[in-house]
Image (cartoon, helix red, strand yellow):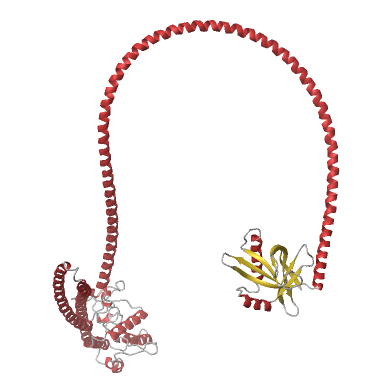
Amino acid sequence: MAAERIFDRAVSVRVRGCGCEERRLNVRVNIELLSVSNPVHKKDLAVRLTDDTDPFFLYNLVISEEDFQSLKSQQGLLVDFSAFPQKFIDLLQQCIQEQNKDIPRFLLQLVSSAPALDHTPVSLNVVETNPFKHLTHLSLKFLPGTDAEIKKFLANCLKCLKEDKMMLEEKLKRTEEDLTRQLNYTQQSLSEKSRELDKLKNEWTSYTTALSNKHSQELTSEKERALQAQTQYQQQHEQQKKELENLHQKSIQQLQNRLSELEVINKDLTERRYKGDSTVRELKAKLSGLEDECQRAKQEVLSLRRENTTLDAECHEKEKLINQLQTRVAVLEQEIKDKDQLITRTKEVLDATQEQKVILEESTEEKQRHIEKLETTIKSLSAELLKANEIIKKLQGDLKTLMSKLKLKNTVTIQQEKLLAEKEEKLQKEQKESQEMGQSLRMKEQEVCKLQEQLESTIQKLEESKQLLKTNENVITWLNRQLSEVQMAKKLDSPASAPAGGRAAVSPLSMPDRPSFHSSGLSHPISPLYAFQNFLEPIHSKNGNSQCPVSKAGTSAFFSVSLQVQLNSQLLKPSRCSDAHTVPAAGHAANKENGDQLGLESKYFKKKDDSIPLRGLSQNTLNSEYLRPYLPAKAQPSPKAAGTPASAYFPG
C-alpha cells in the first residue's frame, strides 16, 4: 500500500453543535491518495482532520471509487473520481484565501449532532455565502478515530517529532561548530586589528605634533606678510581716491553739457512724435483697408483651393478612366488578334462536303423559318408593348387625378397600387423577354453568317477539286496516248514469232484489280501499278541479265487498263469518302517501303478532306524504271531531278 500526500495545511473551520454557539477552530486537513495493488489495483482518497493543540482530535474519511459514485449521485457532482481530489483542494484553497475577511465568501463548517465534539460523527461542509442563501458545494461525513487509530496517529506524530528532533539536534551541532570556528577566527582578527590600531594611534600623535609646529610657523610668517600688504593697499587706495574725485568732477561737467544737448534733442523728438502719431493714425486707417483686402484675398484663395481640389479629383478620375480605357483597348486588341487567328483557322479548315452542303441548306431553311416565327413573335411583343405603354400613360393620368382624392379613398388607392405593381412586373418581364429574343435573333444572324461563309468555302473547295480532277484526267490521257504510240511502235519492231506463253502469263485480264499479299502481311487493297511492279521484280531477279519474257505491249495495256478502271470507279463512286481515305494511305505506305520518290507536284498528293483521291496513280508513276522505255526521251526524268513536278513532263 503506497500513500501519496496531496494536501496538508491548517484551515479555519466554524464548529457548530446542537444547542451551542458557533466557534472557530484551526483544523489541519490532510489529503492522501492510497493505491492498493493486491489483489486488484485500486485508488482510495483518505482525508484526515486533526488539531495541532489537541492530539486526541482525529476524524477520518476514506472514499473509494464505489463510494464516490454514490456521493456523486446524492450531491449532484459533475466531476469524476480522478478529478475530485484537485477540485476539493481548490475549494479548500478558496476557503483559506477568504478566512481572514469579515464576511468570507467561502467557508468550512464542521457540524455535529451532539453539543460537543465528543467522539461523534461529524460532517464537513464547504459553503458559499451570498446575499440570498448559503450554498453547500460539498458535504463529507467524517467518523471519529478509534482508540487504535488515535494510538497509531499519536505514534506517527511521535515518530515524526523524534525525526524532527534528531534533524534539529544535528543542525544545532553543525551550527555550534560553525559558530565556534567563526568566534575563534573573529578573536584572532580582533587581536590583530587592536595591534594595528595602537600603531596607528602612535603614528597619528607624532604626525599631529609635527603639523601643529608647522602651522604655528606659517601663521607668524603670514601675519607679517598681511601687515605689509595692508600698508601698501592703504597707500594705493588714497591715490585712487584722489584720481577718482578728479574724474568725477570732469564727468559731472560733461554730463551737464550733455543734459543741455539732450533737452534740445528732446524738444525736436516731441515735435517728431506728434508728427509720427498723425502718420500712425493714417497708417492705421490704411492698414484696416489692407486687412479687409487681405481677408477678401484669403477667401478667394480658399475658394480657389477648393476648386483646385475638385479639379484634382476630376483629373484623377479621368486618369483612372484613361487607364481603364487603355486596358480595355489592350483587351480588345488581344481579342481582335484571337479572332484573326480563328478566322485564319476557319479559312484553313476544309471540312465540308456535298452532303454537308445539303444539310446546311436544309438547316438554313429551317432557321429562316424559325427566324420568321421569331420576327412574328417580336412584332406581337412590340404591339403588346405599345399597348402596355398606352395603358401606363392612362394609368399615370388616373394617378394624377386620384392624388387629389387620396384622403377620402385610401382603400381604393391601395388596390390600384397593387394592380400597378403587378402590371409593372408584367411589363418588366415582357421587356426582359423582348431583350432575350433580340439577343437570340442576333445569335441566329451570326450563325447564319457563319454558315454562309462555310458554304462559300465548300464551293471554293469543290472548284479546286474539279480543277484537280481535270489536271489528273489530262495526265491520264497523255499517258494513254504515249503508251499507245509506244505499243504500236514496238508491235511493228517486235518479231512475229514471240512466245505466246509469256503473254498469257502476264495478261492484264487474268490479274485481279486489287490483289492482297498475305505473305507480306498486307490485308488492305493495293494499287495495280504496285502489284504489277512487285509481280515483275521476281522475274527480273530470276533472269538476271536475260531479257524479260513479258512483252512491253502487255505492260502498256495493263497500265492503261488499270488507270482507266480505277479512275472510272472513283468518278462513279464519289460519295465513298472513307474508302478514298484509306486506300491512298496504304499506297503511300507501300511506296515508302519501296523507297520511291514523287514524280508529280506535292500539292496533288496532299491529303484534303474535300478532294477525291486517285488510286490509279502511284507516287512514282513516272520515275519507275519499268515505264522509262515507254516514255519519250524528253519526258524521262534524270536521277538528279527525281522530285520535279509533273508540269515538266506533260504539256497542257
Q: Is residue 493 visible?
A: no
Tally the numbered discs. Answer: 0
Q: Picture coordinates of residue 173 (x, y %)?
A: 85, 53
Q: Is residue 552 left or right of residue 212?
A: left
Q: Residue at x 72, y 15 (%)?
A: 219
Q: Picture coordinates of residue 529 (x, y %)?
A: 30, 85
Q: Residue at x 45, y 8 (%)?
A: 251
Displayed quadrant of residue 442 = bottom left
Judged from this view, the residue extending furthest toward the front is: 19
Q: Nearer the viewer, residue 597 or 371?
A: 371
Q: Nearer the viewer, residue 223 or 526?
A: 223
Q: In the rendered view of the protein, which quadrant contains the C terminus?
A: bottom left
Displayed quadrant of residue 423 = bottom left
Q: Residue at x 57, y 6 (%)?
A: 238
Judge whether 484 appears above or below 186 on screen.
below
Q: In the rendered view of the protein, which quadrant contains the N terminus?
A: bottom right
Q: Picture coordinates of residue 208 (x, y %)?
A: 78, 23
Q: Nearer the viewer, residue 104 or 41?
A: 104
Judge whether 227 appears above or below 298 on screen.
above
Q: Is residue 280 visible?
A: yes
Q: Nearer the viewer, residue 602 or 598?
A: 602
Displayed quadrant of residue 111 = bottom right
Q: Picture coordinates of residue 530 (x, y %)?
A: 32, 84
